[in-house]
């Protein structure tokens, strides 16, 4: 491992975060209306004096550069500001929700990767067979169906009609389980949203694995492996799959990056208390500090995931050197 | 009883193939303790014959009839599991490109032990000890380091030695070598051939050696079988076949092997058209935040080239010969030195000033498959250059017909796509593309190394004819001394980016000065016997 390279990447992560703040700070303000309008709307009346007092209270009356400078200053001190609507520190709001999102992501990632690789390697064994075609069709189906629709159908089927699984939330309200019982409760709740997310990515894993394995199976070193007299199983696992999995690392990194900001649609459909639902609330209530905070945290996590992906890649493929 | 007796073997191709049979009624024997060479060009069925012995025919390809007796047992009747046990233990195989034949992400040690442990119940540690032993028997040094290394960290020669070590790890009775030196440099090839010969004698095993090169046959074989279109045309002791070839195709194959003797006289002294002096090119890796490393690929190289003359640049991989060519046509910007074309320095010219001069230096590339755009018709490919220089499309196409005729292709093929042509034909198309711009200088970068011997001979002849007819100055880049001898008036030998030696071809071959040139000449396979 190259500590120097990793240190440089971390510095770049900070630069990315700053760039994200700058860009989103202005982009957010392009939308008409501000927090004062929304709050006044919620309060039910909106005379000029009240609006003005709100704007003064939140510093919205000051020129943009001043607002930006003040914001950057607080961020630099590790404070992401206070939510206009929820009136709590943004950082603690995000940190409360982040573990839920990461849990859902991890579940979706593991299910998608494991299922996709398994399906893909079955399909690759006999390209053109019935199994392979069925696999391709199913993959295309899950890939092209909108996630929120798939989520609603899953909910309808498994929660409403069959009644097997809870329709929404992360745990049973008011049950106050502790320890193992609570874990089991969460596990049951994660199945629907997690699988909805996973099915979409699983399709991609299956297709990528299938293509990569068919390609690798044609390589000379696979012929060498057979010429050595090792068993077909070992040829498939140690030589074909081992090499076919390398490009999947990039995809897994990409998937993690896509998911980490919270999946707004799926989290909302299943009322999953993650960053995605938080972001949705922030957008609809023009809660700019909260939205900016989510952007910054997401940007930093995406950068870190990219770094982890690169490190994982260099471990999986000895030909790849970090920093080259 | 011979170790291997192939009797009336027929191998069928899938219905989608261009012909029904890849191997047609082949009879062949490999005796104990002897080296049998199968020689033939691509598509002759030599490789599939070998794969049939291994029980490793590709999917859809089947042994339709015949028998392959190994030690009296018919291999075609064995169960897959029985064949798996034989592979690696009784019959081992090494392949053409050792880089591709080794798993890139598994350490060398593991790749060797994997084979040993597939057949013997021993621990990984014990297998590693055996692997280390084998590698040192193959003449490899720093064996412990090597076991931990990955294939890309080894040289081509080291990789092929690892492959051979692996193949020999269970002392097989038969070693099948499928073009094991084709992807290697000449000097490395000579070492590997010597190694195979040595271990064959030491272990008294049988070797089935597949090659396209009669030079290699002359050096290696006890017996030789000549194959073409799936059939064995001629079969016998190597001395007999080489000395008195019975079949006309065998005679043609032997005749097509470049002699390694210069036929061309040095050209009369003429005013040089191209003058290269002190050309230097460095490559930097890393940088930005890291320190980076600098490789000098071309180091202070000077040369001259006149009209009507062919200068050969000879060197092994990594010698800088291709980088030199790329700098001369400004596909790369050199770091130092100058390239004078008719007195104008094109090495430092601005892009705009350079553009009108570009057509005067044209290049023919090594790989006739990747150097033509697969989605463009031949007509579009070869008229693209003139059209860029403002020639009327209709006129360009009319001229293209003439040029196609000149390179021996039918002008009516102009609307076809590259994949409809053979390797040799594609190389002719590549040449036609270059000639369409009426260049003064033609740079040919390994133009025949991807081609079969008989096709190679035709393309070399064509290049020479074209040079003569159009009074071209030709720079001919090759790793093959024999090829250089055939077409070059003068030769320049390069190594590690530097010029080792240069002079008239005849002098270099007759009286090489540097040790490196001597080693290159000594490495030419079959030099004494062909």
Image (cartoon, coloured by chain):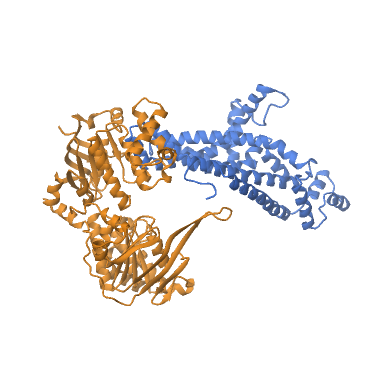
Chain colours: A blue, B orange
Relative height, residue B448 to residue B49 (above, below): below
Q: Specify whether A244 is left or right of B436.
A: right
* Residue B407 seen from this side: no
Q: Quadrant of the N terminus of chain B?
A: top left
Q: Specify whether A7 is left or right of A143.
A: right
Q: Specify whether A136 is left or right of B180.
A: right
Quadrant position of residue B265: bottom left
Q: Position of residue A246 (x, y in %)?
A: 48, 41
Relative height, residue B475 to residue A177 (above, below): below
Q: Position of residue A99 (x, y in %)?
A: 67, 35
- Residue at the spot x=36%, y=68% of the render? B362
Q: Nearer the viewer, residue A165 or B231?
A: B231
Q: Nearer the viewer, residue A269 or B142?
A: B142
* Residue A52 seen from this side: yes
Q: How many marks?
A: 0
Q: Quadrant of the C terminus of chain B?
A: bottom left
Quadrant position of residue B14: top left
- Residue at the spot x=21%, y=42% of the render? B23
Q: Position of residue B294 (x, y in %)?
A: 49, 57
Q: Specify whether A171 is left or right of B117.
A: right
Q: Position of residue A229 (x, y in %)?
A: 33, 32
- Residue at the spot x=28%, y=55% of the render? B451
Relative height, residue B126 to residue B100 (above, below): above
């Amino acid at each position: 491992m190259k500590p120097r390279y990793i240190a440089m990447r971390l510095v770049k992560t900070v630069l990315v975060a700053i760039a994200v703040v700058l860009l989103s700070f202005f982009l957010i303000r392009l939308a008409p209306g501000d927090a004062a309008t929304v709050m006044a709307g919620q309060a039910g009346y909106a005379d000029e004096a009240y609006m003005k007092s709100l704007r003064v209270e939140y510093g919205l009356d000051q020129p943009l550069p001043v607002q930006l400078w003040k914001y950057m200053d607080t961020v630099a001190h590790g404070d992401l500001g206070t939510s206009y609507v929820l009136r709590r520190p943004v950082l603690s709001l995000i940190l409360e929700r982040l573990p839920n999102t990461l849990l859902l992501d991890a579940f979706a990632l593991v299910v998608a990767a494991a299922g996709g690789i398994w399906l893909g390697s079955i399909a690759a064994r006999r390209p053109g067979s019935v199994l392979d075609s069925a696999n391709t069709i199913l993959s295309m189906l899950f890939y092209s169906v909108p996630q929120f629709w798939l989520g609603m159908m899953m909910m309808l089927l498994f929660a409403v009609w069959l009644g097997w699984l809870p329709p929404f939330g992360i745990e049973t309200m008011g049950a106050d389980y502790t320890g193992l019982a609570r874990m089991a409760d969460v596990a049951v709740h994660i199945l629907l949203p997690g699988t909805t997310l996973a099915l979409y990515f699983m399709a991609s894993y299956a297709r990528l694995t299938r293509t990569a394995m068919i390609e690798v199976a044609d390589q000379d070193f696979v012929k060498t492996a057979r010429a050595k007299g090792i068993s077909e199983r070992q040829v498939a696992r140690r030589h074909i799959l081992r090499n076919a999995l390398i490009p999947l690392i990039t995809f897994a990194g990409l998937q993690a990056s896509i998911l980490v900001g919270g999946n707004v649609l799926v989290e909302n459909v299943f009322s999953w208390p993650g960053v995605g639902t938080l972001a949705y609330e922030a957008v609809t209530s023009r809660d700019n500090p909260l939205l900016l905070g989510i952007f910054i945290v997401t940007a930093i996590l995406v950068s870190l995931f990219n770094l982890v992906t690169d490190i994982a890649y260099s471990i999986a493929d000895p030909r790849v050197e970090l920093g080259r | 009883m011979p170790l291997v007796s192939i009797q009336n073997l027929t191998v069928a191709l899938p219905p989608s193939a261009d012909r029904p049979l890849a191997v047609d009624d082949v009879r062949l024997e490999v005796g104990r303790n002897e080296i049998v060479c199968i020689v033939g060009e691509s598509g002759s069925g030599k490789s599939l014959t070998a794969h049939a012995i291994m029980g490793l025919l590709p999917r859809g390809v089947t042994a339709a009839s015949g028998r392959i007796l190994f030690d009296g047992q018919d291999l075609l009747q064995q169960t897959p599991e029985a064949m798996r046990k034989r592979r690696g233990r009784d019959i081992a195989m090494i392949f053409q490109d050792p880089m591709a034949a080794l798993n890139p992400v598994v350490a060398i040690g593991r790749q060797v032990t994997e084979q040993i442990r597939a057949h013997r119940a021993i621990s990984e540690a014990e297998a590693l000890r055996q692997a280390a032993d084998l590698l040192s028997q193959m003449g490899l040094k720093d064996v412990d380091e090597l076991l931990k290394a990955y294939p890309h960290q080894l040289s081509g020669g080291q990789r092929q030695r690892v492959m051979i070590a692996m193949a020999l790890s269970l002392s097989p009775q038969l070693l099948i070598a499928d073009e094991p030196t084709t992807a290697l440099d000449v000097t490395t090839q000579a070492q590997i051939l010597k190694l195979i010969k040595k271990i064959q004698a030491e272990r008294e095993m049988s070797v089935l050696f597949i090659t396209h090169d009669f030079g290699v046959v002359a050096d290696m074989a006890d017996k030789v079988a000549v194959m073409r279109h799936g059939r064995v045309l001629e079969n016998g002791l190597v001395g007999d076949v080489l000395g008195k070839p019975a079949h006309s195709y065998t005679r043609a194959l032997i005749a097509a092997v470049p002699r390694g003797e210069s036929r061309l006289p040095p050209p009369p002294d003429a005013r040089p058209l191209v003058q290269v002096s002190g050309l230097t090119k460095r490559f930097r890796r890393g940088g930005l935040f890291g320190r980076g490393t600098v490789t000098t690929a071309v180091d202070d190289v000077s040369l001259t080239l006149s009209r009507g003359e062919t200068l050969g640049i000879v060197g092994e991989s990594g010698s800088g010969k291709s980088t030199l060519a790329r700098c001369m046509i400004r596909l790369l910007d050199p770091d130092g030195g100058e390239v004078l074309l008719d007195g104008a320095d094109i090495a430092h010219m601005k892009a705009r000033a350079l553009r009108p001069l570009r057509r005067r230096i044209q290049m023919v590339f090594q790989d006739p498959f990747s150097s033509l755009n697969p989605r463009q018709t031949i007509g579009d490919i070869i008229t693209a250059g003139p059209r860029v220089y403002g020639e009327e499309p209709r006129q360009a196409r009319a001229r293209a017909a003439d040029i196609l005729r000149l390179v021996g292709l039918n002008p009516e093929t102009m609307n076809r796509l590259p994949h409809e042509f053979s390797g040799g034909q594609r190389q002719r198309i590549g040449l036609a593309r270059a000639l369409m711009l009426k260049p003064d200088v033609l740079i040919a970068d390994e133009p025949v190394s991807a081609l079969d011997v008989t096709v190679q001979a035709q393309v070399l002849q064509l290049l020479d004819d074209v040079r003569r007819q159009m009074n071209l100055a030709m720079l001919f880049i090759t790793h093959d001394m024999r090829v250089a001898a055939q077409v070059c008036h003068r030769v320049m030998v390069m190594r590690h980016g530097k010029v080792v030696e240069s002079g008239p071809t005849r002098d270099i071959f007759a009286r090489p000065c540097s040790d490196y040139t001597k080693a290159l000449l000594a490495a030419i396979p079959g030099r004494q016997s062909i």
